[in-house]
Image (cartoon, grey):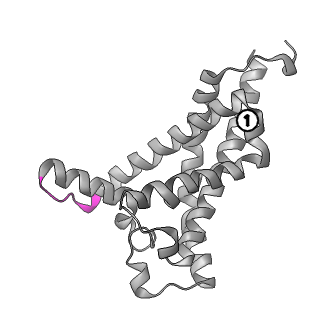
Amino acid sequence: MLPSMKRADPLRGALVGAVAGLVGAYVKSLAEPPLQRLTEKAFPPTPEQKKMIGADPIGRQDHMPPAEMIKAADEALTGHTPSKDAKLKGQQVIHYTLGATLGAAYGALAAVNPGVTRGAGVPAGAVMYGLTHATAVPATGFQAWPWQLPLAAVLWESGSHLAFGLTTELTRRAIEAALDRMD
């Protein structure tokens, strides 16, 4: 079958996207520390601002929104505060589950509407930032709204989502190309 005549397969797109989203989540986690250092050099937060939830992953990794979610769930279910180690492990589960889920949604959408891949996934990363840290996370009370956070935190967090989108798209393209060669 000619490439232009290939039938859209959202299930395949979702599966490929989930794998690509895991890779994107990994790269996002690697991008955050250097982005934090860079943005804090340009826009230094105050010591008080660095104490805010989600403002300092280098110094307070267990004070990021997913770790706070784990803490709230554990306290509600067991009445006990989880250890730092438990919060960090739970945070990773949330981080990678969300990466795979967002990647799956993106991959399924890309399969039926290839236009969403314009910009090599960077615009999709911006949308994902908008859906998560700019709206859903603050709406649940696990992080301040972007206009309440230090500018550096908003910049490194949004920048890491752009890295997520780019990596997810490039990985998705590579996997799709490899699968097409196998057909």
> Residue beneath label 1, please?
174
Q: Quadrant of residue 103?
A: top right
Where residue 79 sits: x, y (%)? 11, 54
User: What main secondary structure does the magenta stretch of the protein show?
Assistant: loop
The answer to whether residue 77 is left or right of residue 104 is left
Picture layout, residue 9 above or below residue 166:
above
The answer to whether residue 101 is left or right of residue 115 is left
Where residue 7 sits: x, y (%)? 75, 16
Q: Which residues are magenta?
A: 79-85
In front: 59, or 165? 165
Give the residue at x 70% y 28%. 111
Magenta span contains residue 10? no
The answer to whether residue 160 is left or right of residue 73 is right
Where residue 56 sits: x, y (%)? 44, 73
Picture layout, residue 106 above or below residue 62:
above
The answer to whether residue 11 is left or right of residue 170 is left
